Image: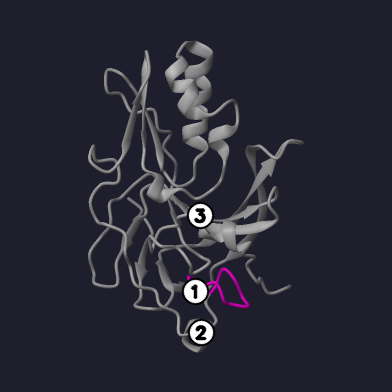
Amino acid sequence: MQKLPYIRITKDGPYMLYGGTRISEKIILTDENGISIKYGDGKTFEIKSDPVALCRCGKSKNAPFCDGSHAAAKFDGTETAPFEPIMRQDTAEVIKGPQQSLLDNQRYCAFARFCDRGGRIWNLVMQGGDAANELAAQEANLCPAGRLLMFTNDGTLMEEESAAQVHTIEDDGLKISGPLWIRGGIRVESADGKSYEVRQKQTLCRCGASGNKPFCNGAHASLRWKANTKKD
């Protein structure tokens, strides 16, 4: 059985990705009204060492890889996110509709905006019915951060599973770069050696400005942050 890759955070330094073979770019595509509708495929970054250091300060000139810029920038990478499950009843909002329920932890918003794709997800859940329920489930599954989780009211989780994958996100609608998107149960280990909750999908901050490190909280959008990728 193949071992899953995992990520270890270094103190005020990069993410160390162990067991990865490549990082692929996912592009948020929008319609004529600027609504996020789907992901497109971008470039692929081949990994030539194990582990490989990935930038989390936002200053690298060879993104997504670390080039040591965090040292000159005196990057403060202090981790502030909790280790408890993000969908606990005391930390996540519960929106209960006629057939389905939504759990929402805004602290983990990556500002991908798929929650508006077919009508706002919160309204769809409350509306109920086959069409609205299907759209709500689609929107939750497009959320890269795992901020939104859909359940049937009998407790069945409606989250799609994925193979272990690592992506960078580029936002074509806003013309900015987004977080590191990890999928398929990839474990994230803190600089102190403690593991965060293992989830199907998570987004890790790449701009260096999140208030919920190591996870993205959408700060890249307000900064209009753009990753500096070395040209081939």
Of helix, strand and loop, which mostly describes the magenta segment? Answer: loop
Question: For the point 31% across and 40% down, which residue is it?
Answer: 92
Q: Residues within 10 Å of mark 3 (few under 14, many from 20)?
A: many
Which residue bears the numbered disc 2?
A: 73
Does the magenta portion include 63? yes
| Camera-nearest residue between 85 and 209 | 209
Q: Amino acid at mark 1?
A: Cys
Instruction: Identify the secondary structure beneath mark 2.
Output: helix
Relative to 176, 219 lies left or right? left
Q: Kindly report the distance in space between the C-alpha atoms of the residues bearing marks 3 and 1.
A: 15 Å
Relative to 165, 151 lies left or right? left
Q: Position of residue 222 (x, y in %)?
A: 58, 58
Q: Position of residue 48 (x, y in %)?
A: 53, 73
Q: Amino acid at mark 2?
A: Ala
Question: For the point 46% across and 73% down, which residue is it?
Answer: 52
Question: Dots 1 and 2: beta carbons under 8 Å?
Answer: yes
The range drawn in magenta is 56-65
Question: For the point 47% across and 15% down, which residue is it?
Answer: 127
Q: Is residue 142 visible?
A: yes
Does the magenta portion include 146? no
Which residue bears the numbered disc 3?
A: 218
Say whether disc 3 or disc 2 marks the residue closer to the N-terminus: 2
Q: Kindly report the distance in space between the C-alpha atoms of the residues bearing marks 1 and 2.
A: 8 Å
Relative to 77, 153 lies left or right? left
Q: Amino acid at mark 3?
A: Gly
Q: Is residue 137 visible?
A: no
Position of the C terminus by quadrant: bottom right
Which residue bears the numbered disc 1?
A: 57
Question: Dots 3 and 1: beta carbons under 8 Å?
Answer: no
Question: Dots 3 and 2: beta carbons under 8 Å?
Answer: no
**Whether residue 130 is situated above or below residue 150 in the rendered picture:** above
Instruction: Identify the secondary structure beneath mark 3.
Output: loop
